[in-house]
Image: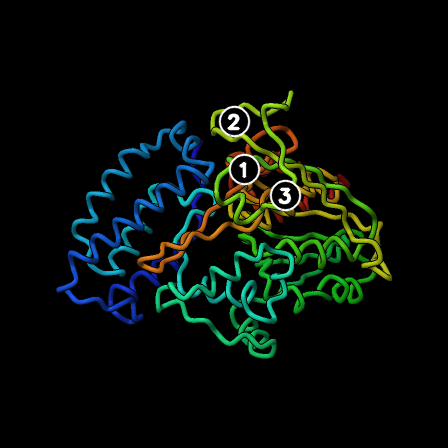
Amino acid sequence: MRFFRQKQTIARLAVFLWICGALPFGGHSVSETDKGRARFQADFDLLWEELTESYPYLPYLREQGTDTDSIYERYSAELASVDREAGFADMLQRMFSELGNFAHLKLVTPELYRDYYCIYAADSGSAAEHSPGVFKSILRDPRLWAGYKAPECPETERDVATQSRYPKTAVHYYDDCKALYLQLPSFAQEIVDRDRSVVGDALKKYPEAEHIIFDITGNSGGSDYYWMENLVAPFGGRYEFNFRNFFRESDIYHEYYSDLEAQVVSGLEDAPAWAELMGLDRYYESTLVLPEEGSVPSPLNGKIRRWVLIGSRVYSASEKFACFCKATGWATLVGKRTSGDGLGATPVLILLPDSGLLVRFSYFAGENPDGSLNAAAGTQPDVICVKYTLPLTRCLELIRQGF
């Protein structure tokens, strides 16, 4: 089974800037080389301790042929030539790439830090109240590397920034089959409010539509609140989405999720085989009930046929939407298998205290309704596209054929 890789353009650009000195990455002198090496070794050992104890996917990666012991040894040896934060950051990102960046395993770049800060640590952070408080404390920790600049996050500035960073939804109407098409490039938390009326406005413009197509083939995720509030809730109805998350009890569990009602896997009669393989000893059950009661005063046309186009770039929050559609029948999925890792929580943050760098990864391993590992299997469409056939083309064919 192949590994699914996230786009690394931003991360690589940030690392390049660090190396070139465009970002003030510490600035330790060569005279501090020996001291720096010892500091990076301590952070490196701490990172691997956290990965071994808390990152659930190392055993899975080994099973799939990744020599994690060799990766550890090679990069540990490479520390002898690392004397500045720029080199350490570059080394970690290359190491994570060899691990496939699997399940959100990634070095936090300055840009990603700014996004996290505005969402979870700013006084006006809209998602902070629904997330563990440890996010705020880590993002404000005084030991953080100086390149992680806490931004100003007033609502007005954030709105202006998102206009340029996130393209708006593209809308098209196919008269011959009365199909309304919406291309949704992102589920970013920053644009939940901006796009709140996108679906309603489109249906008002084309009230005769009998089909609505949501294209998320290029959507790599963001926030679950986007699709729950902006796509599902407006149509009304009541849907329950049940799934289980498995994890290995560690310090992260007590630090992030001490109030979670977790149970022991050994008490399950239907525990998936991969949970034992990965050494996951705890699990919890989640139930999403959508939409929330009273959240939709005037539901949109509930009779309209809903379609969702998916593909290999669907990941994280957009994956959760795809899995919700498949499990509840909210929409018909057309396209190709997704990249998964959507049935969990926001990736945890690990602070490497001496360098001040942040690393993130998924702590939970979500189970698909069919018992498969979501991060590996993703979600299969209801209608699979054959090679070279675009999901939209296939969807329109189905509509015109009266499928």
Mark number for residue 260? 3
Q: CA distance from mark 2 to mark 1?
A: 10 Å
Question: Label 1 vs label 3: CA separation?
Answer: 15 Å
Q: Which is nearer the N-term, disc 3 or disc 2?
A: 3
Query: In the figure, 10 relative to 54: above or below?
Result: below
Residue wearing tag 2: 274
* Residue hosting label 1: 365
Residue positioned 48% across, 43% down in the render: 251
Residue type highlighted by circle 1: Ala
- In the picture, measured across the screen, residue 295 lies left or right of residue 93, that is right
With respect to residue 325, does 371 lie above or below?
above
Q: Quadrant of residue 355?
A: bottom left
* Residue farthest toward the right in the current orientation of the protein: 298
With respect to residue 350, does 247 lie above or below? above
Q: Amino acid at mark 3?
A: Leu
Report the Cα–Cα distance between label 3 and label 2: 22 Å
108 or 195, which lies in front?
A: 108
How far from the left and from the top, in percent, is residue 360? 44, 51
Circle 3 SS class: loop
In the image, 77 versus 263, the foreground residue is: 263
